[in-house]
Amino acid sequence: MLTVIIFLAGLGALTAGLAGYLAARRTGSTENVDGLLAEQERSAQARAARASFSSIAMHSTHGLTTDLLGKYDK
């Protein structure tokens, strides 16, 4: 029973440490212009991906364009 408690405490400490590290890393500022430009480009790509892969974008298309509708009726 004691080993389970120690294991869970260690796992909790590891999880809390990882969460703290990731939170601190995310709020850190970029050191130079190249890093800032790369960060802005990744943010723009993520924004575009969220817009194009949203459920509204996926469900508002017809799948086939109207030009191709009769092509597959054979």
Image (spheres, rainbow, N blue to C red):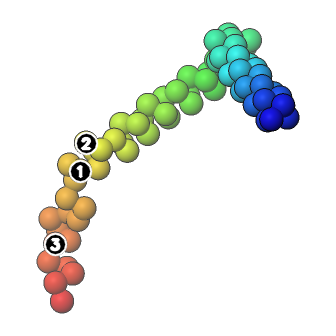
Q: Are marks 3 and 2 in contact (CB under 8 Å)?
A: no
Tell me the amino acid under the disc marked 3.
Answer: Leu
- Please identify the quadrant where the C terminus is shown: bottom left
Q: Residues within 10 Å of mark 2 (few under 14, many from 20)?
A: few
In the figure, residue 41 lies in which quadrant?
top right
For the view shown, which residue lies furthest in the front direction?
Answer: 1
Q: Which mark is residue 72?
A: none
- Is residue 13 found left or right of 41 in the rendered image? right
Give the percent coordinates (x, y) of residue 40: 56, 22
Please tell me whether residue 62 is drawn above or below residue 10 in the rendered image: below
In the figure, residue 23 lies in which quadrant?
top right
Q: Which mark is residue 59?
A: 1
Give the percent coordinates (x, y) of residue 43: 52, 27
Name the element at disc 2: helix
Q: Residue at x 74, y 11 (%)?
A: 31
- Is residue 27 found left or right of 50 in the rendered image? right
Q: Are marks 2 and 1 in contact (CB under 8 Å)?
A: yes
Tell me the amino acid under the disc marked 2.
Answer: Ile
Report the residue marked by disc 2.
Answer: 56
Tell me the amino acid under the disc marked 1.
Answer: His
Report the residue marked by disc 3.
Answer: 69
- Tell me the distance, in whole angstroms, between the alpha carbons under discs 3 and 2: 22 Å
Indicate which disc, 3 or 2, sits on the residue closer to the N terminus.
2
